[in-house]
Image (tube, helix red, strand yellow):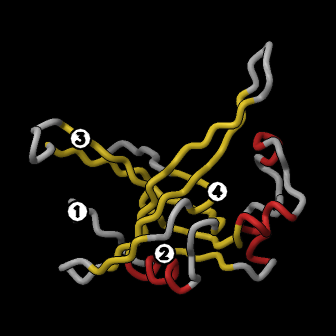
Amino acid sequence: MSKSVNKVILMGYVGKEPKVETLKSKDKKTTLRLATTYVVTPKDGEPKQFTEWHNVVAWNSLADLVEQFKTKKGSRLYVEGRLKTESWADKKTGEQKSRTDIVASDIAFLGNKAEADASTHVEDNDAAVGQNTPDTPAHVADNNDAVVQNKDTTPDMACEW
């Protein structure tokens, strides 16, 4: 069997209150929207900032920790996980739909937007790659912020939206 990689790393802000639910299978699931930003500077223009929204799903003990750390709109998170895309036919129209989620395997709780805006941080995302900045999990762990690794197996089944 050939090897492949499906790994996502994000750091951003929660856009609305996370949704926590316990499924019929007794698995606990937390879903949240995470916003990340990037800047594009055209050759002849002003830099423009864009926001990308990501669907993040945390299962079982990791879902519990998202709730325990009182994650809410504006919370700053570092998320590692994998992409999972699902497709289905709309029940009313028959139209094909799809959705891509990040299934979280690790989450670091980094505070909130107000705290981040008040601190000094690297403005250029490219400059932070490969450096031990305050935004990397290794530094966060030294800072007594929470770095959580999911030890559970995440259900790989059709989601109950």
Q: Which label is found at residue 157? A: 1
Give the CA separation, mark 2 to mark 1.
Answer: 18 Å
Q: Amino acid at mark 4?
A: Met
Give the CA separation, mark 2 to mark 3.
Answer: 29 Å
Residue occupying the point 63% across, 63% down: 78
Q: Amino acid at mark 2?
A: Asn
Residue located beneath label 4 in the image: 11
Residue located beneath label 2 in the image: 150
Q: Are marks 4 and 2 in contact (CB under 8 Å)?
A: no
Q: Residue 1: image x %, image y %?
A: 31, 45
The furthest residue to the right: 120
- The quadrant holding residue 19 is bottom left
Q: Residue 151: image x %, image y %?
A: 46, 78
Residue located beneath label 3 in the image: 97
The furthest residue to the bottom: 68
SS class of the residue under badge 2?
loop
Quadrant that contains the C terminus = bottom left
Q: Counting other residues with Cα less than 10 Å from the Cα at mark 4, is it few (<14), some (14-19), or many (20 or more)?
A: many
Position of 121 compared to 75: left or right?
Answer: right
